[in-house]
Image (cartoon, rainbow, N blue to C red):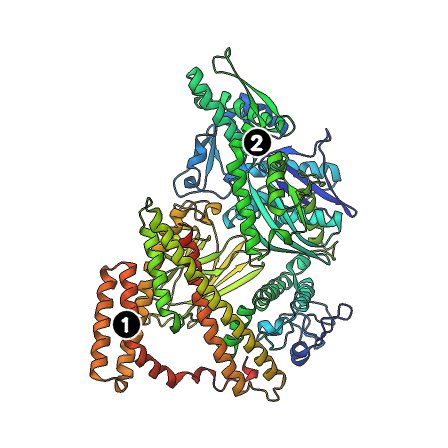
Amino acid sequence: MPYVVGIDLGTTNSLVAYMDGKTPRAIPDENGQVALSSIVAFFQEGLSEAVLVGEAAKERLVTHPEETVYSVKRFMGKGQEDLEADLKHLPFVFAGKEKEGIQIQIGEKTYSPPEISAHILRALKARAEKFLKTTVTQAVITVPAYFNDSQRQATKDAGKLAGLEVLRILNEPTAASLAYGLQKEKEGIIAVYDLGGGTFDISILKIKNGIFQVLSTNGDTHLGGDDFDRKLVNLICDEILKTHDVDIQTFPEVLQKARLVSEKVKCGLSSEDSVEIVLTLPDQKTQYKRQITRTEFEGLIQGLIARTIDSCRQALSDAKLEPSDVKEVVLVGGSIRVPLIKERVGDLFQREPHSELNPDEVVALGAAVQAQILSGAITDMLLLDVTPLSLGIEIMGGVVSRLIQRNAPIPTTAKETYSTQVDGQRSVSIHVVQGERELVADCRSLAKFNLTGVEPMPAGMPRIEVTFLIDANGILNVTAKDLRSGKETTVEVTPTYGLSDEDAEKMISTSMENAKADLEKRQLIESKNEAETVLRHTEKALVQGASLLDDAERTNIENAISDLKNAMSSGTHRELREKLSALDQATQRFAADLMSQSVQEALQNKKLSDL
Amino acid sequence: METVSEKTGSVRGPFFEKKGVDRPCWSCKSEQVDLFNCISCKTIQEFLSDTNYFASLNQGYTLNIDLEQLEKQYYDLSRRFHPDYFQQRSKEEQEISLENTALLNKAYQTLKDPQKRASYLVRLVEGNDEPLKTQAPASLFEDIFEIQEAVEEMRFLDPSDESGRNNLKETLKIALEKMQQYQKDEREKLYGHFNEWDQLESGRQSQDFTDPQKSCLTQMKQILSHSGYLDRVIQDIKTALKF
């Protein structure tokens, strides 16, 4: 039986693991190292192009910064517009056009993030094949739980490019819980706090009789140990600019060196109270030196850690749990070595976090367990995962109609019926978005597609049923069907890069500005929609129920209608509400009369066997 | 109510028993099929096309549900259907596993929550696919209008106007309490109807739901449509309180 391996494709390090009987094990390289640095270096060797991955590539970070790519995971499934803030920190050059996926320029060539990730995957595949002495063609690859659809697709593509059949895209914290569950054989509610080099996830799970049920998940796909380093780099840059009047950001080699120094300093401060920062300036003579204390460092990063704690609170609230309901907190990822994290997480959950498992390996080990489940060799464990972000579709006025709520268990489907807005409309365009905000413009656009060949009919007559299916990988499939003609289109959801979107993590709006603006826009749109509906019904009712009205009441209602129409064309949300309310008052008696005639109709003559 | 028997693959219970075997296996055409598996070729079978959420989890049409038992049923059926266990099987079997699991997941999400459960029953009996329409309770029209005013004012408030903010916050907090109390009282009423429904359901002799059951549903529908509306109002107040 061929091995299905588990791969943790990390921002900083990547690992591959397999099941040795009933025990998952990470596969070491010839030097006994299990972690492979997620760094890819390109260079010309004679006439051909050569690629180095891992430690060998790391050495070229400082000597050839423009040809050595690190932290490529941050760019998976992202568009140009997503990256503005990152560009100035990175020594390599981005190419590609607006509204397209990112391309990284190395010399004359450009590479997409999946292509670069594929080099890392190939290296891991080769390592596993050498170690297991057999070919490896199938893998489970982990991603942050908070990855959106585009990012998952990109990861799957990378696997394909590396010659691997990706049996499953698995969420990292869920993978960790599998490894944890296997070792500890404990039951109850656990929280997995996973802070890696570039991403953060929190997942709340319930473990019972071998079932690992994810109750909720939250996170930030742009927050990790890299950001801690960057805080230090910024400090160094600022101080050098001030005291030596040199902007090291314009010297890629020095900037890269500063990043590596910062990483070392950060690690040092996990055990020391104070560490010295030393950096040679571009003149190759002057040295910048300063002592930094742990407290000072903690001051720099406490805002970042606070963001992770907010995510934890949201995850708990989504799972309808209190911190005290959590029986065990598992810490995963290299960045959890920062002592302040243990402290803050411990404060939130009121208990000492659990860190007996190797935080660097546990995700890969869990992926190996899942690989074994998928290959049929383990039948007593089962993962029930959720989708991290809500999915919806654009409706009138740029508002999102949510079809699948975040934290819904996957696989799942949702159906909704839509209609046309103009007489004779022959095609309906459907815009799929992902995110928690109320307006389409603030969510991530996943795909736009057209359902053509709609029978021309008066507006509102066609019935188009749209089905969303999220599979066990968390990847979305959309189909649409014209219920009258039976015509169907299937849509492969390909990422719509860069539609002025914010990142997935920013989509759950916590900022007041967003909340205010959203509320305002949403209320206005909703009121207008409501007013339209009310007007349509009222006008219809005035005709149908004419006999139930006297002249005075009729005039009253007609005045209220014309006031409302005026407010609709020019009014604020508030005026609209007032006029709506006035119309409501004016029609109350009339509506009650109409209603009493039809109340029971819907419920009549329903047979149990019809259900 | 019995759950799925692990050993024999046979099932019992009101739905699983009633529906029985009324179709051949899609794969080998054998007539020897139980609800989930073909007895002769062992392939997975689709849920019957008219399977609703109650039926998929082998629940009767009761509104008071034993959540532990529901969870157990969900876990047991997940073990049967989940795509993870069909990775090495044919494409057709993988598709059935995906669809069955998707239905099961939605059913569990719906039935484990009392309000969603009741809304679903109302829609099921009405034959209505759409979510229930929400509606403001008439007795709260004035309060709601005042809340909307206050939310609006909060939004346009001069940031330096501390006392104005505090006054508005006070107003909103009082309103929030009132809305929450109303919701709480309504929920009590709803649960009262749950008991009433279950009693009627246990005494039901006929194939059809009885008139008293229908009127019980109408009353629940009213409560649900109000509480759906108020959920939104409460959400808006909470958002505004953060301004």
Does any portion of residue A423 appear in the rendered image? no
Secondary structure at numbered mark 1: helix
Helix or strand or loop: what does disc 2 sit on? strand
Task: Tell me how far mark 2 sits from mark 1, CA to CA.
Answer: 67 Å
Q: Where does residue A138 sit, x and y in percent of width and height?
A: 66, 47
A559 relative to A45, above or below: below
Location of residue A423 by image quarter: bottom left
Image location (x, y in percent) of residue A320: 57, 58
Under mark 1, the amino acid is Leu
Position of B108 with respect to A304 (left or right) is right
Using the rendered view, name the quadrant where residue A160 is placed: top right
Q: As shown in the figure, which amino acid type bears the numbered disc 2?
A: Val
Marks 2 and 1 share the same chain: yes
Q: Residue at x 39, y 39 (%)?
A: A97
The residue at 50%/75% (across/down) is B123
What percent of the width, then of the height, locates residue A256? 52, 24
A153 or A170, nearer to the observer = A170
Residue A496 visible from this viewpoint: yes
Residue wearing tag 1: A583
Looking at the picture, does residue A345 appear above or below residue A239? below
Residue picked out by circle 2: A40
